[in-house]
Image (cartoon, helix red, strand yellow):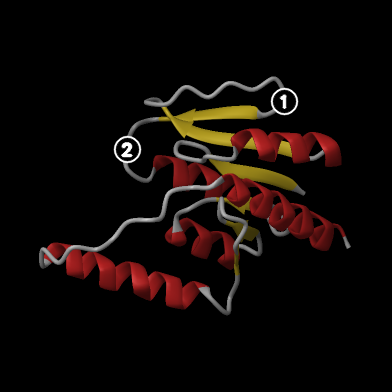
Amino acid sequence: MKILVDADACPVKELIEELAREYRLELVMVSNINHIIRSNYATIVVVDGSAQSADIAIINLARPGDIVVTQDYGLASMALAKGSNAIDPMGKRYTEDNIDELLLRRYINQKARQARVRIGGPRKRKVSDSALFTLGLRKLINDSMQ
């Protein structure tokens, strides 16, 4: 089992690295050339700046049982289809039970934005969100190891 991170806009890279070290899991952070990611532990994969390059690289590396950390519902859906697990930076696990609704909501919001309807963005991240993420990822790791 390894952890794959959609690292460009991931606010919890350090927390992921701490848990990967603790559990001695392979960690791969994927970023495009426009972002500089450094780590003494993770393998850093740098892809070109094309829109879906990081997602494609992550899916190509993902295997059943791996964990993908992403905010991207499309990437999460592909990870689930490959038998990987997926979790967002707030600690919410993507599952077969919730991914279709999330993708539909993304589509509806996209159509609303195209129609110039103002859609509120995500709320500002709080310190407590990091604790929730750590709990969620730890539980996912432990569940995956059983």
In this rendering, is residue 39 above or below 25? above
Residue under pointer 2: 50
> Along the line of sight, which residue is nearer the eye, 83 or 22?
22
Q: How far from the left and from the top, in percent, is residue 57?
A: 50, 42
90 lies left or right of 51: right
Residue under pointer 1: 41
| Disc number for residue 109 | none
Please tell me which of labels 2 and 1 falls first in the chain. Answer: 1
Residue 5 lies in quadrant = top right
In this rendering, is residue 96 above or below 116? below
In this rendering, is residue 44 above or below 66? above
Q: Residues within 10 Å of mark 2 (few under 14, many from 20)?
A: few
Res 67 visible: no
Residue 95 lies in quadrant = bottom right
Q: Residues within 10 Å of mark 1 (few under 14, many from 20)?
A: few
Q: Residue at x 49, y 28 (%)?
A: 46
Q: Residue at x 68, y 45 (%)?
A: 3
Q: Amino acid at mark 1?
A: Tyr
Number of marks: 2
Q: Residue at x 64, y 22 (%)?
A: 39
Q: How far from the left and from the top, in percent, is residue 37?
A: 53, 24
Residue at the extreme right of the image, as rendered: 146
Residue at the extreme left of the image, as rendered: 115
